Image (spheres, rainbow, N blue to C red):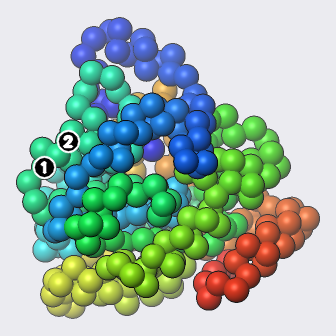
């Protein structure tokens, strides 16, 4: 959850401050727990000025944001990997509500200064999206991932990223996840809120599991949504460049640009497993049933289903 700007260390003091980085606390904004640094600057986030030709990639954290960012980036650059590799993904696509390094331009300022058309990233639930996105009818790609893999990935991300709150034990984390007491709030509210919004706004709602199962089909959907042509040669280039093993090796997508005292990839890699069903290595039978029950209850009556294995 860090930006490329984290690397702009100006002095030894910057390094010292970052090495003593404090884990975030959660602060509610309109009843949704957000990182304290986001909550402090909430008015600025809310006033963000979207443009009609913006593309926003929005997800619950750990649903496959980086993957779809890189797919979009490749499509936009006509499959030119050199262009994509000029900057880390964190710098190509500003993460709107993330505030990391005092003294550097915020993501909001970076986005304001970007020429159109812009591609932006957010993890905000639908009710917290700055209203200008709705007013401008900017295009939005939303990616959802099944709750079990999403929770598993989020837990390991908390372990390795010192900028996130303390995860506690897996059991405690899972309880917080189910109760929505984690950063960016309830997974259930998030996936449902965006699912309903797609009936009224230009939103392409994708599933991690579908991209994993048939990347060609889902990548074509994205290109179509962007009104861009994707001939087969180009499609194959996008697929190859964004395959998990390639993104894991790629320093522009694997977050190794973020210092290890923030993201300690020896604890857990940012590009960790990249699969559907890894939750089976994490959940006990009781925990699996606990989350199944929560899903049955909270997704009841909503025409929204998730696959926990392929
Ligand atoms: P795991 O922790 O399950 O491996 P985000 O980008 O939203 O933070 O999501 C990160 C998750 O997406 C991680 O899941 C990561 O491995 C996975 N991911 C990233 N790139 C991927 C790719 N090219 N193919 C499949 N999964 C990918």
Which percent across, then down, holds residue 255? 39, 45
Residue at point 73% right, 73% down?
298
Q: Which mark is residue 114?
A: 1
Which percent across, then down, holds residue 160? 57, 39
Judging depth in this view, the residue of 173 and 250 nearest the camera is 173
- Residue closest to the far left: 115
Q: Quadrant of residue 167?
A: top right
How would you rate the neighbour count of disc 1 (Cα within 10 Å): few for under 14, some for 14-19, many for 20 or more? few
One can see residue 285 in this view: yes
The residue tagged with tag 1: helix, strand or loop? loop
Q: Up-down: is 28 above or below 281?
A: above
Residue at point 58% right, 28% down?
23
The residue tagged with tag 2: helix, strand or loop? helix
Cα distance in 3D space between marks 2 and 1: 6 Å
Q: Quadrant of residue 101?
A: top left
Residue at point 51% right, 79% down?
196
Q: Which residue is mark 2?
A: 110
Contact flag, marks 2 and 1 (Cβ < 8 Å): yes
Which percent across, then down, holds residue 109? 21, 39
Residue at point 13% right, 49% down?
114
One can see residue 256 in this view: no
- Residue closest to the far top: 13
Is the distance from the Cβ of mark 2 to the nearest ligand 1 atom less than 8 Å? no
């Amino acid at each position: 959850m860090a930006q490329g700007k984290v690397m702009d260390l100006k002095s030894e003091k910057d390094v010292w401050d970052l090495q003593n980085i404090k884990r975030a606390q959660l602060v509610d904004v309109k009843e949704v727990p957000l990182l304290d640094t986001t909550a402090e600057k909430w008015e600025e986030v809310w006033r963000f000025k979207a443009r009609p030709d913006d593309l926003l990639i929005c997800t619950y954290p750990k649903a496959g944001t980086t993957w779809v960012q890189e797919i979009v980036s490749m499509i936009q650059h006509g499959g030119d990997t050199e262009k994509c590799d000029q900057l880390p993904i964190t710098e190509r696509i500003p993460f709107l509500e993330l505030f990391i390094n005092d003294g550097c331009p915020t993501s909001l300022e970076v986005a304001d200064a970007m020429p159109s058309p812009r591609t932006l990233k957010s993890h905000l639930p639908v009710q917290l999206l700055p209203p200008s996105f709705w007013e401008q009818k900017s295009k939005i790609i939303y990616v959802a991932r099944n709750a079990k893999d999403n929770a598993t990935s989020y837990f390991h991300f908390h372990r390795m990223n010192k900028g996130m709150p303390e995860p506690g034990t897996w059991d405690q984390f899972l309880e917080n996840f189910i109760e929505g007491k984690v950063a960016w709030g309830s997974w259930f509210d998030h996936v449902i809120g965006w699912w309903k919004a797609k009936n009224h706004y230009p939103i392409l709602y994708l599933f991690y599991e579908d991209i994993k199962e048939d990347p060609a089909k889902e990548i074509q959907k994205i290109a179509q949504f962007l009104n861009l042509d994707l001939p087969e040669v180009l499609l194959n280039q996008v697929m190859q460049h964004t395959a998990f093993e390639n993104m894991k090796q790629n320093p522009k997508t694997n977050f190794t640009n973020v210092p290890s005292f923030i993201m300690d990839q020896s604890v857990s890699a940012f590009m960790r497993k990249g699969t559907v069903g890894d939750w089976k290595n994490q959940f006990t039978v009781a925990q699996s049933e606990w989350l199944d029950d929560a899903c049955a209850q909270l997704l009841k009556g909503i025409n929204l289903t998730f696959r926990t294995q392929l």
